[in-house]
Image (spheres, rainbow, N blue to C red):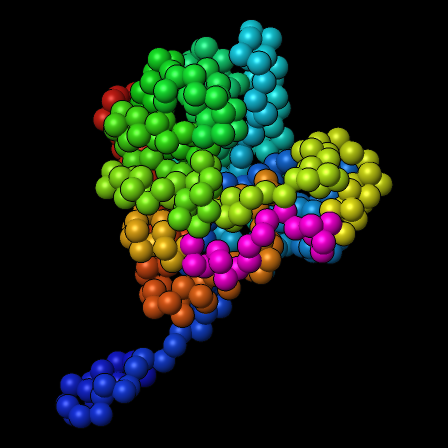
Amino acid sequence: MTRTTLIAALCATALTGCASISPPREDPMTVHRDLLVLDTHLDTPLNFGREGWDFSEAHTEANDIAQVDLGRMAEGYLDGGFFVIYTEQGPLTTKGYADALASARKRSDTIDRELAKFPDLLRPATTVAEAERLTAEGKLIAFKSIENSYPLGEDLGVLKEFYDRGVRMAGPVHSSTNQLADSSTGEIKWNGLSPLGKQWVAEMNRLGMVIDASHASDAVLDQLLELSRTPVILSHTSPRWAYDHPRNLDDARIRKLAAKGGAICMSTIFMSEINLDGERGELFDQYEDIASMSAAEQRELIRKWRELDRTQPLWGVDLDRYMEALLHVIDVAGVDHVCFGADWDGGGGIEGLMEISSLPTVTERLLDAGYTPEDIGKMTSGNVLRIMGAAQSGAASDGPRQ
């Protein structure tokens, strides 16, 4: 009989004095370690291929700019997530599409090569069943996703190519409006999805891929919720309640998303205005090309970046404000419709939650707020896997993929 069970038994036989007795608080680190923890948006492939950089090492905030590596995944008990194929938006021209597609293929190949170096530690996954099997084997899980479907050009058949490359989540748009959809931070061209974008939704459903509405305009999200036959996710988005920015999601739409079975994955970005003034903006642009830098150039970038962190942080919020926003999102959406996508290695990270080794702190705060390990487990992975399963089941009902 456990201590908790003993307390319950005593309370059942003695009607006085039990109101003041509560079960012992579970150890936060133990709870966190025992959870399956996934992050839905890892921009870490940006660092793959860097000269002198080893994904297997545990780097530190002091000596590196990357926030995710295998060493710190072990320290923070991050069991995996979605490694992102990101493509910068370019012109909506034949050449622009061709260049973007070449870049996306290259990033996909880079992810595959990096994962192949560590087969005993982590493996690619494309289904919920594969993720569960890898967990049972004690291996980390590597899904692939697309941020910005611009590389598809006007040929949605290319989406099947990336499905075959292992991609299981994709968003239509990034920070600028493209051929598929209006961006939350771009011009209003389509009043939501373009005609091609609506076809993109149908093809995503047919293939069994999860639709990611991060970066999309409010009108796009509204239309995605109407058109998609399976739940929609926002892989790295903050609530507009915390900061009124078009990149964030308002409470009414969070409720609509939840009502359709979807989930919002809490980010660390845009809970304040991003600080890209002066040298900080220049360094941010350089960081996007860090894989092409020499080791010496990387060290200089890191040195300047960390100096600015002390005087000009990228974001003006800390862990306390993050938790206020997270608890608000949970209150609005419910524990069945919240997940985590901090935007690690893509601009995410705030004071008190600057890298993944700090993840157990979030679990501790949630336990302190009264959420159970079961509640937290839904948010750290259960909801994401449920949405993936729904997408896969929806595709299966359509028959074989051609």
Q: Nearer the viewer, residue 86 or 133?
A: 86
Where is 378 relative to 100, above or below? below
Residue appearing at x 58%, y 18% in the figure: 90
Where is 15 relative to 31, above or below? below
Count of numbered circles on the image: 0
The magenta stretch is 308-325
Determine which quarter of the picture holds residue 170: top left
Q: In the orientation shown, which residue stands out farthest toward the top?
A: 94
Residue 207 position, x and y percent, is 35, 24
Is any atom of residue 1 visible in this view? no
Determine which quarter of the picture holds residue 354: bottom right
From the viewer's perspective, is 338 left or right of 17?
right
From the viewer's perspective, is 385 left or right of 53?
left
Residue appearing at x 45%, y 59% in the figure: 323
Is any atom of residue 374 visible in this view? yes
Q: Main secondary structure of the magenta part?
A: helix
Q: Nearer the viewer, residue 78 or 300?
A: 300
Residue 13 position, x and y percent, is 14, 90
Q: Is residue 319 magenta?
A: yes
Q: Nearer the viewer, residue 381 or 364?
A: 364
Residue appearing at x 32%, y 59% in the figure: 375
Q: Is residue 6 magenta?
A: no
Image quarter hosting the N terminus: bottom left
Residue 243 position, x and y percent, is 46, 47
Residue appearing at x 15%, y 90% in the figure: 15
Image quarter hosting the C terminus: top left
